[in-house]
Image (cartoon, rainbow, N blue to C red):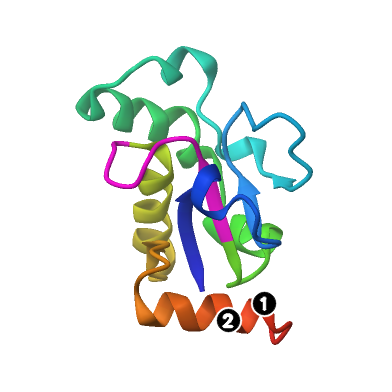
Amino acid sequence: MIFTSNFKIAGHLPQAVAISLGVPRGWQGARCIVLAPPRPLIKIMDPETFIPLYRAQVLDRLDPYKIIRDLGGDDFVMLCWEAPGEFCHRRVVAAWLRKHTGMLVEELNPKLRRHQDWLREIAGGQR
């Protein structure tokens, strides 16, 4: 499964991939800088302004299938800083992947049973 989340919730998972320019101090996990918004876009809080610029400057230049392959096939969690429910570029990436590949990318919610099942599988080394 492919998920999005933030560092606080899922940064400890081995499938975690940072897609932001900044990472927590001591971060040892994987990174995918090509999905990070350029510095000038980071300050834009208005989704109607941010989304078209982010698509044009970042996503439209990438191959979604290559991104999926590079990040682990169908077994990774894309992370950045914002809390679930806050506007964030990781959800824009999720929508972009869905549009171009048909793959559903959900926000990881450890309280949901199907997400708990996935977390148990990865903890047991079954993935």
Is residue 85 found inside the magenta-colored segment of the image? yes
- The answer to whether the residue labelled 1 contacts the one labelled 2, judged by CB atoms less than 8 Å apart, is yes
Indicate the quadrant where residue 49 lies: top left
Number of other residues with Cα within 10 Å of mark 1, as a class: few under 14, some 14 to 19, many 20 or more: few
Indicate the quadrant where residue 10 lies: bottom right
Secondary element type, mark 2: helix
- Rendering coords of residue 78 (x, y %): 54, 52
Which residue does the numbered mark 1 point to in the structure image?
A: 123
Q: Which residues are magenta?
A: 77-87
| Residue type at the position of mark 2 | Arg
| Residue type at the position of mark 1 | Ala
Which residue does the numbered mark 2 point to in the structure image?
A: 120
The residue shown at (43%, 44%) is 90
The residue shown at (58%, 72%) is 74
Q: Is residue 66 left or right of residue 109?
A: right
Report the magenta stretch's main SS: loop
Relative height, residue 96 to residue 116 (above, below) = above
Indicate the quadrant where residue 43 lies: top left
Tell me, for residue 72, which label it has, or none.
none
The residue shown at (53%, 16%) is 39
Relative height, residue 101 to residue 85 (above, below) = below
The residue shown at (71%, 61%) is 14
Q: Nearer the viewer, residue 77 or 38?
A: 77
Secondary element type, mark 1: helix
Give the quarter of the figure containing the C terminus: bottom right
Q: Is residue 65 left or right of residue 88?
A: right
